[in-house]
Image (cartoon, rainbow, N blue to C red):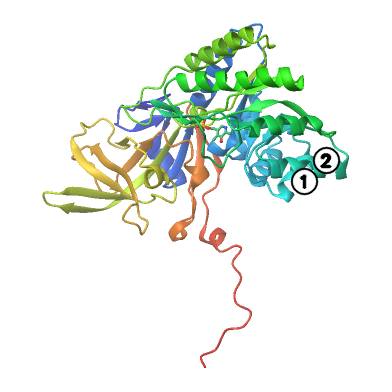
C-alpha cells in the first residue's frame, strides 16, 4: 500500500478515501487513478529538502512529460513549481492550463521551427539548447523577432546512471547535448556568449532515470563544475544556474528501495558547495527536474479482469481490458509492477498468474508473475500500482483502443480530469477517400 491506500471493511481497495469499486462503476475501466495527496506530499518533500539551505537559490521544475494534462499542470502551478516541456504539444497544454510562461523551460533535441517560434511568441522563460543547429536557428529567430532569450546549454558529462549503478562512459554516445569531454561544450559556451540575443544562464545535465544512488549526481556535478571553472578562466563566464535534471527513483515493486528525496538533494548541494569552494566559483542556483518521482507512485491503473487461459504445468494467464496501449513500459523496458485484486483486497493472495493485456502482441504482458487470491477471477477488478509516470503520457491507440479516463482522488471524492475517449474520438481526423477506386 502506498500513499493514502487502505482496504475497506468490505475488502475493497480505497485510494484517497474513495472506493475503487465505486470508481470502476462510475468511470469505467481501464482507469488511471491519481492520489492527489501523494503528489502534494512529494512536491513538498522536494521543496523542504531545499528549504533547509537558507543561503541557497534553487528551483524545482516538474518534468511534465511524465504526465502532462491540464489538471496536473495546474497542480504543479499551485505549488509554485516551474515546468519542463519537451514539445509544442506539452507547451500548448501548459499554456492552456494557465501556467505562467516565464516559468516554463523548453527542452528537446530537435525542436522544430514552429516549436521555437511558439516558445518565443508565448514568452517561455528559458530554452535549454541541445545542439549547434538549434543554437544557430534560435539566434536567427531572435534576430528576426528582436527578442532576447535566456538559455541553458544541455551538456553531456559522460556519466550515466540507472537504478543502482552509474557508469562513467568517458566519451558519451548519446543524441542529447554538448559533450563535455571533447570540447563541444566549450565551443557551445563560447558561441552562445558571442550572441547578441542569447543570455547564457548556465548549464543543464540529466544523467538518467529511476536512479537509486547519489554517486552519479555527485560525479556529474564534479565534471560540470570543473568545466565551469575553465569557462570562468577562459571566457570570464560564471554559471548562474546548474540544472542537474531529474531521474530520482521510485518504488514500483517491493524490490525497489528509493532513497528519501533529501538524500539526493543533500548530496547534490554538498558537492556543489565543495567544488565551488575549491574552484573559487560563486554558488550557482541549483535546479532539479523531477517527473516520475512526483507522479509515479501516486498513479494506480484499474482494470477489469476478463478471459483466462490455464496451461497445465506452465502458467495461468488472466487478461485485463487494457495493456500496452495504456502502459507500454513492461513491453518497452521490461518494467515490473505489482497488482492487487481491488475488490478482494483483503483476501490472502497465493495464486501466481500472468497478467496479460488485450493487445495483439505476444509481448503485451503487464506482469509476468502476480500473486492474486484464488477467489479472484474474471469480472473482478485489478489495481496495478505506481503507474502514474509514463503511463498515460505514453499511451497509444494501438488496436484502436480509446485512451482511458483519468481521475484525481482526495479526501473521499473523485474528480474526472481527462474524459475517456470514445470511438468517435478515434476517427475524428480520419478522412474518407474522395473517390473509390472501383474494381477494374
Ligand atoms: C525525462 C527527463 C526528466 C525527468 O525524468 P524523471 O526520471 O521522470 O524524473 C528531467 N529532465 C530531462 C531533461 C528529462 O529528459
> Which of the two residues, 158 or 165, is positioned nearer the viewer here?
158
> Which of the two residues, 188 or 87, is positioned nearer the viewer here?
188
Question: Would you say residue 44 is visible in this rendering?
Answer: yes
**Which quarter of the picture shows residue 213?**
top left
The number of numbered badges drawn on the structure is 2
Q: Position of residue 413 (x, y in %)?
A: 50, 31
Above or below for 208 versus 320: above
User: What crowding class fits label 2: few (fewer than 14 Cα within 10 Å), some (14-19), or many (20 or more)?
Assistant: some
Q: CA distance from mark 2 to mark 1?
A: 9 Å
**Which quarter of the picture shows residue 201?**
top right
Q: Position of residue 260 (x, y in %)?
A: 45, 16
Question: Would you say residue 250 is visible in this rendering?
Answer: no
State which mark lies toward you, 2 or 1.
2
Name the mark on residue 142. Answer: 2
Above or below for 283 versus 148: above
**Residue projecting furthest to the bottom:** 440
Q: Judging from the image, what secondary structure is the residue with disc 1 in?
A: helix
Name the quadrant of the N terminus: top left
Ligand 1 closer than 8 Å to the CB at disc 1?
no
Q: Is residue 397 left or right of residue 190?
A: left
> Which of the two residues, 347 or 92, is positioned nearer the viewer here?
92
Residue at the image point whose x is 54% and y is 60% from the top: 426
| For marks 2 and 1 on the same chain, the one whose residue lies earlier in the sequence | 1
Q: Quadrant of ligand 1?
A: top right
Ligand 1 closer than 8 Å to the CB at disc 2?
no
> Which of the two residues, 232 or 397, is positioned nearer the viewer here?
232
Q: Is residue 182 left or right of residue 22?
A: right
Residue at the image point whose x is 77% and y is 19% from the top: 236
User: What crowding class fits label 1: few (fewer than 14 Cα within 10 Å), some (14-19), or many (20 or more)?
Assistant: some
Q: Position of residue 438 (x, y in %)?
A: 54, 89
Which residue is disc 1 drawn over?
117
Amino acid at each position: 500500500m502506498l500513499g493514502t491506500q487502505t482496504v475497506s471493511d468490505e475488502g475493497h481497495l480505497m485510494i484517497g478515501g474513495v472506493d475503487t469499486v465505486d470508481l470502476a462503476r462510475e468511470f469505467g475501466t481501464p482507469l488511471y487513478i491519481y492520489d492527489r495527496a501523494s503528489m502534494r506530499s512529494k512536491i513538498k518533500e522536494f521543496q523542504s529538502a531545499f528549504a533547509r539551505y537558507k543561503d541557497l537559490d534553487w528551483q524545482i521544475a516538474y518534468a511534465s512529460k511524465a504526465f502532462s494534462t491540464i489538471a496536473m499542470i495546474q497542480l504543479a502551478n499551485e505549488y509554485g513549481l516551474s515546468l519542463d516541456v519537451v514539445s509544442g504539444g506539452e507547451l500548448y497544454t501548459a499554456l492552456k492550463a494557465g501556467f505562467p510562461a516565464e516559468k516554463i523551460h523548453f527542452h528537446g533535441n530537435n525542436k522544430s521551427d514552429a516549436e521555437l517560434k511558439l516558445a518565443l511568441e508565448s514568452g517561455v522563460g528559458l530554452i535549454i539548447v541541445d545542439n549547434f543547429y538549434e543554437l544557430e536557428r534560435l539566434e536567427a529567430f531572435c534576430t528576426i523577432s528582436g527578442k532576447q532569450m535566456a538559455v541553458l546549454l544541455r551538456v553531456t558529462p559522460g556519466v550515466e546512471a540507472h537504478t543502482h549503478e552509474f557508469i562513467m562512459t568517458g566519451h558519451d554516445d548519446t543524441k542529447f547535448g554538448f559533450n563535455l569531454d571533447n570540447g563541444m561544450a566549450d565551443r557551445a559556451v563560447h558561441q552562445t556568449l558571442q550572441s547578441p540575443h542569447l543570455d547564457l544562464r548556465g548549464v543543464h545535465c540529466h544523467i538518467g532515470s529511476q536512479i537509486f544512488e547519489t554517486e552519479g549526481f555527485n560525479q556529474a556535478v564534479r565534471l560540470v563544475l570543473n568545466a565551469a571553472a575553465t569557462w570562468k578562466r577562459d571566457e570570464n563566464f560564471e554559471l548562474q544556474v546548474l540544472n542537474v535534471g531529474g531521474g530520482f527513483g521510485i518504488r514500483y515493486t517491493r524490490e525497489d528501495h528509493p532513497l528519501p528525496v533529501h538524500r539526493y538533494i543533500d548530496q547534490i548541494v554538498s558537492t556543489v558547495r565543495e567544488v565551488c569552494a575549491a574552484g573559487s566559483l560563486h554558488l550557482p542556483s541549483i535546479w532539479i527536474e523531477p517527473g516520475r518521482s512526483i507522479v509515479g507512485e501516486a498513479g494506480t491503473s484499474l482494470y477489469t479482469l476478463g478471459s483466462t487461459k490455464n496451461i497445465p504445468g506452465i502458467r495461468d494467464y488472466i487478461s485485463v481490458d487494457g495493456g500496452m496501449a495504456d502502459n507500454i513500459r513492461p513491453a518497452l523496458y521490461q518494467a515490473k509492477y505489482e497488482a492487487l485484486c481491488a475488490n478482494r483486497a483483503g483476501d490472502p493472495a497465493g495464486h501466481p498468474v500472468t497478467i496479460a493485456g488485450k493487445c495483439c502482441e505476444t509481448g503485451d504482458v503487464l506482469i509476468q508473475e502476480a500473486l492474486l487470491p484464488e477467489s479472484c477471477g474474471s469480472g473482478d477488478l485489478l489495481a496495478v500500482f505506481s503507474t502514474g509516470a509514463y503511463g498515460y503520457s505514453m499511451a497509444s491507440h494501438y488496436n484502436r483502443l480509446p485512451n482511458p479516463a483519468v481521475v484525481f482522488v482526495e479526501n473521499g471524492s473523485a474528480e474526472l480530469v481527462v474524459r475517456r475517449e470514445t470511438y468517435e474520438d478515434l476517427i475524428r481526423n480520419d478522412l474518407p477517400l474522395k473517390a473509390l477506386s472501383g474494381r477494374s
